[in-house]
Amino acid sequence: MKQTHSSFPAPTNLDRRSVMLGTIGLLAALPAAHASATAKAKASKKQPAPAPEVWPRASQVPGGVARLSLGPSAKRPQAFAGDIPLLVLGDAIEWTALTGIPLAAEPGEASITVRAEGKPERQIAYTVAPKQYREQRLTVAPRTVDLSPEDEARYVKERDHLTGVMATLTDMRPDTVLKMRVPVPGRRSSSFGLRRVFNGQSRNPHSGMDIAAGTGTPVLAPLPGKVIDTGDYFFNGGTVWLDHGGGLLTMYCHLSRIDVKVGDVMKTGEQLAAVGATGRVTGPHLHWSVMLNRAMVDPALFIAA
């Protein structure tokens, strides 16, 4: 019989030894791999659950929000920044005071006053950290920077009226969640706190968030609220104010159309106006402000990143 030969050479002793060692190594590695996988599984089980979301997020800087624990109390405590009431949320196990920090606040120590039934009045201290906001230079119509006597008189009258609007304080529904929806889709064209220079002249810092959107784009309520003011203002153009309770207010400016009236009660997502380019602007956009205990604060703290 003719003998055939395989095209593969017979294994040498060295080859057999390599195979045996490799097999032994693989078998030895299996328990280690299993142990590693088991350890990872146990580690993943031990990881704590993510902390629940809280709104607004804390940011103890000028224009930010401090979240200050007041501890337990059978009834809701009262808290004040000076003589201004603060928004207090929580339950008998844990109460929290939300403190809007004015843009003009100096970095350093600050405090609030707390009054709880059956307990002595006390102070709670917190620290305001420094923050340097960027500068923004804009070119706008000269008459909106160097005001005529008539425009100055109009502005003063409007300012006095809005001072009363901003002092609005009503009760907040206990089930209110302070996570806001963005009131209009679009690019965030100017952030909160910018140090603004109009036509080469320094003016007040930017007190809200600008969202670029086309004229006529619907503006929606970010939270349930009540319309407390509407009007056409010199700097802000078409404007709507909403009261969400507890000293939390929101403002919408430069509107081309206002679809609500004072006294209307809004649900989250209901249309209140349309984007425009009224007042002192460089183009159509929504200026959105959030006010907490009479301090303008960063709207970004109330929305998902």
Image: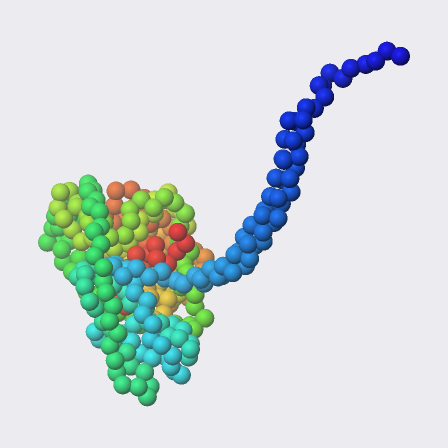
Q: Residue at horizontal 13%, vertical 43%?
A: 200
Rendered location of residue 32, percent (x, y): 58, 48
The answer to whether residue 72 is above or below residue 48 is below
Picture coordinates of residue 290, whole percent (x, y):
31, 60
Q: Is residue 55 left or right of residue 138?
A: right
Indicate left or right for 106 with 264 as reference. left
**Residue sitting at 27 percent across and 85 percent down?**
120
Instruction: Name the spot of residue 94 as percent of width and height, x first.
Output: 40, 75
Residue 77 seen from this side: yes
Question: Residue extending furthest bottom?
Answer: 118
Nearest the eye: 69 or 196: 69
304 and 84: which one is in front? Answer: 304
User: Seen from this angle, which residue lies furthest left?
Assistant: 149
Q: Is residue 53 left or right of residue 4?
A: left
Picture coordinates of residue 286 (x, y %)?
33, 49
Q: Residue at x 23, y 59 (%)?
A: 129
Q: Is residue 239 visible?
A: no
Q: Above or below — where is 136 with respect to 43?
A: above
Q: Is residue 263 above or below residue 305?
A: below
Name the side, left or right, on which 39 lies relative to 212: right
| Quadrant including the N terminus | top right
Q: Residue at the spot x=17%, y=46% of the render?
A: 197
Count the marks. Answer: 0
Q: Nearer the viewer, residue 57 or 273?
A: 57
Image-quadrant location for residue 64:
bottom left
